[in-house]
Image (cartoon, rainbow, N blue to C red):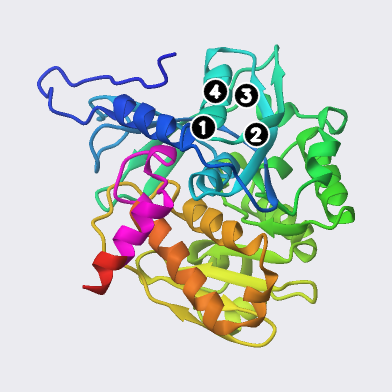
Amino acid sequence: MNIGLYIPHPQNSSLPLFPLQFLAQSKMAANNGVAKEGGLIVSFGEMLIDFVPTVSGVSLAEAPGFLKAPGGAPANVAIAVSRLGGKSAFVGKLGDDEFGHMLAGILKENGVSGEGINFDKGARTALAFVTLKADGDREFMFYRNPSADMLLTPDELNLELIRSAKVFHYGSISLIVEPCRSAHLKAMEVAKDAGALLSYDPNLRLPLWPSPEEAREQIMSIWDKAEVIKVSDNELEFLTGNNKIDDECAMSLWHPNLKLLLVTLGDKGCNYYTKHFHGTIGAFAVKAVDTTGAGDSFVGALLTKLVDDHSVLEDEGKLRELLRFSCACGAITTTKKGAIPALPSVSEVHTFLDASHN
């Protein structure tokens, strides 16, 4: 199966061969020969195709070509977990088309259980065109009208799989429209009733929402259910209406059920807040090529360690060590184009951390 698409510029034949790199990484992840141990992390939500320009700093119209990259934040997290040696599964809906089956294949090749995947014969797999600015940051243009992920119904959920989760992770895109919103709420309830830790990364994508007000209302509608929440500095500003990113602003989002609140700060690291302590982890200096998936890589690393050791939330030293590892994963992910191909393995992270000490 050809899972990469390279559209070359007629005058530039030296652009990177993304598909070969991605295939090699997938093969490594699938054939690492190690039986997965530990609790299951289930990611719920969307998976789609990102079309990423072959060069940074140009508009979509000016892009000489695009690389086809599998994406979608919940799917990225599931693969990040698997690549770091954890057990993960994905729950969502794909189009019964070539892209949908390609994406399901990528999950399988990367060691992610696909028992929670449904296919829709009437809707296509979602597409997103991603503009890479000169600094590697992104802007999105989506093709979902509607896409298959929006049509997942509560009756299609694999409840047995969801009940087996030790951590249930989700975003907010699945809250935008019915029937997926009802499926999201049911899955969350079932996971919680079965004893799972609920993890929430809103992953704000304003172009997908009818209005900023609706986005804010719906994102906050499930806020008090999650025990671990990660937001970016931009999301914190959006949700609070406060452009001052400080402890007071962050703690305005605290709720009694919350065990860990994380605010990622891009190239400045992250802030962490628990019931007993708070602090900052500095960033790693890297040359960012594409920030797509950096937050998902960070979350995947966090959950992989947290799933079997909640004591991290009570021990600041252990938490800081874990967050440094997670920040390293996020940093590494920005150094390559596309989210999933850039997600690191444990050995890559340790090599990176060793080099950063020198």
- Total count of labels: 4
Label 2, label 1: how many angstroms apart (C-alpha)?
A: 26 Å
Q: Position of residue 236 (x, y in %)?
A: 56, 67
Q: Residue furthest bottom?
A: 276
Disc 4 marks which residue? 105
Residue position for label 1: 142
Kindly identify the amino acid type of the residue bearing the numbered disc 1. Phe
Magenta highlight range: 333-353
Q: Earlier in the sequence, mark 2 or mark 1?
A: 2
Question: In the picture shown, does residue 174 fall above or below 316?
Answer: above
On screen, residue 328 above or below 246: above
Instruction: Say whether marks 1 and 3 touch (CB < 8 Å).
Output: no
Instruction: Assess whether mark 1 and mark 2 are in contact (beta carbons under 8 angstroms).
Output: no
**In terms of secondary structure, where does tag 4 sit?**
helix
Disc assigned to residue 112: none
Badge 2 marks a residue whose secondary structure is strand
Q: How crowded is mark 3: few (under 14 residues within 10 Å), some or many (20 or more)?
A: few
Q: Disc 4 versus disc 3: distance between alpha carbons? A: 24 Å
Q: Is mark 3 on a helix, strand or loop?
A: loop
Name the residue type under label 3: Asn
Q: Which residue is drawn at the image coordinates 38% and 75% (left, top)?
A: 282
| Among numbered discs 2 and 4, the one appearing first in the sequence | 4
Q: What x and y, as percent, mark residue 266?
A: 40, 64
Q: Residue at x 41, y 35 (%)?
A: 28
Residue 141 can be seen, yes or no: no
Pick whichever of labels 4 and 1 is earlier in the sequence. 4
**What residue is disc 3 on?**
145
The residue under label 2 is 113
